[in-house]
Amino acid sequence: MVQITLSTLKTLLFTLGPFLLPRLLSYFRSYRHAASKTKRIPIRPLPPHLYRSLNILFISTLLALTSTHPYFSPENIFTTTNSRIQTPTDVLFTRLASLRPNGTLTSLDISLKPRIASLDARCLYLQYGPEILTHCPFCVSDEPLSYFWYALPAILYPHILHLFALGAATSSVIARKEGSRWRNTAVMIGVGLAVCECWIIGSRDWKANARAIRAEDLDHFYWGKRVWRGVGFAVVDVVLAGLLWVAGTNRWFVVPPTVGERMESALRMFEGARGRMAALGVVRNVVVRDEGLRRRGEGYWRKEGAVMAEVLEEREVVEGIRGALGSGRISVSQVEEDAKKYAEGIVGPMNATLQQSQQPQGQ
C-alpha cells in the first residue's frame, strides 16, 4: 500500500497551500456575503437538468470504485506466489508456472522473466507495474526515470477520463448556470489529483522494497496507488454532486438573481397577470351581454348579500366584532384610511387618464 509520511504531508501542504488557502478564504467571504442577501430565497426542488449532472457523477463514481477491485488490476507475481523480493528468478517462475493452467507460463510471463532478474528491476516492478516493465523498449534499470516518462501517459489517462466526466457534469449545456459555476473548481481539483499522483510517483524512493526481508514487508506501491486513485476519484465526484445538490436546491452557496433576471421575472409576472385580467374582462363582457347569465349573476350576488347579512346578525359574530372593537385590536379609523388609500390607488390613475383624454377635446 501507499505510505504517506508526515514529511510527505508537509510537502503537499507547502506546495498546494498557497493555491488552496486564498481560494478557500474567497469562498468563505463570498458565502457570507451571499448568505446575507439570500436569506429569503426559498428552498426549491432540484432542477431537472441537474439530475443529468448527478447521473454522470454517479456513473463516474461507480466506475472509479469498480476499478479498485483486484479483478481489474494486473497480476502481482509476488503476491500470487507469496515470494520474497530476493527469491531467485527460476524459483519465482517455477512457482508461478505451477499456478498456471497445464503448468505453462503465459507469453507475458515469458517476456517478463528476463526483465525481472535483478533486484533493481523488481523494485521498479513494484513501483510501475508489470506492463511498464515488460513493454518499455528503451527503459533500463540504470536510468529509473526512464520508466517514469514511459509510464506517464498511462498515469495521466485515468485522470483525463475523470476530467472529462467532471467537465461534462459541470458544462453549461448539461448543468446550465447552476453547474457551470463549479466548472473551474472541479477542473482544478481534477488537475490537482493528477499532479499529486505524478509528484508522489516521481519523488518516492523506488528502492524502498530492496530492504524488505519477508514477503509481508513488501510495499506493493503500484497496486495500492490504483486503489487510492479510484477512491480519490469517487470522493471528488461525491463532493461535487453534493455541491451541485445544495446549490441547485438553494440550501447553500445561493447566488442571488441579477437585476436583469429580477426584471425579467417581474415582467413575466406582469404579463401573466395582464393576460388573466384580459381573460376576466372577456368573461365579464360575455356575462353582461347575455341576459340569462346576467340574471344568474345578479341572483348570486343578491343571495350572497343575504347570506352575509344573516352571518353578521348572528350573536357570536356580533359579540366578536364588539369585542374586537372594544379591545382596540381593530381600529376603525385605520381601516377607513387603508380603504381610502386602496380606492385612491385604483381610481386615481383612471381619473388621471380620463382628464388627459378630455383636455384635447376641450381645446
Image: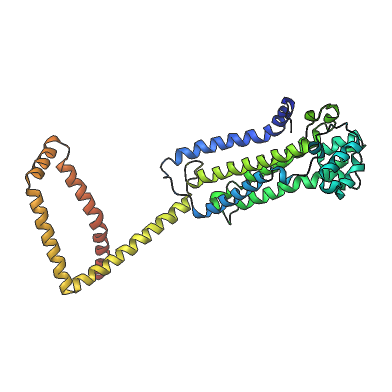
Please state if 340 lies on the left or on the right of 312 as rendered. right
Query: Does the image show residue 170?
Result: no
Q: Quadrant of the N terminus?
A: top right
Image vertical order of residue 94 relative to residue 213, above or below: below
Q: Nearer the viewer, residue 101 or 174?
A: 101
Q: How is the image coloured?
A: rainbow
Identify which residue is drawn at 57% across, 51% down.
Answer: 55
Please state if 172 lies on the left or on the right of 152 as rendered. left
Q: Nearer the viewer, residue 295 or 103?
A: 103
Q: Which percent across, then down, holds residue 138?
A: 91, 46
Please state if 215 lies on the left or on the right of 241 as rendered. right
Q: Which percent across, then down, holds residue 319?
A: 8, 41
Query: Does the image show residue 99?
Result: yes
Q: Which percent across, then down, holds residue 185?
A: 62, 43
Q: How many marks?
A: 0
Residue 323 picture quarter: top left
Q: Which percent across, then down, holds residue 272?
A: 36, 61
Identify which residue is drawn at 52% across, 45% down.
Answer: 245
Residue 302 picture quarter: bottom left
Identify which residue is drawn at 75% across, 46% down.
Answer: 156
Image vertical order of residue 310 relative to residue 237, above or below: below
Q: Nearer the viewer, residue 27 or 1?
A: 1
Identify which residue is drawn at 40% across, 58% down.
Answer: 267
- Farthest residue toward the front? 102
Q: Nearer the viewer, residue 121 or 347?
A: 121
Q: Quadrant of the C terminus?
A: bottom left
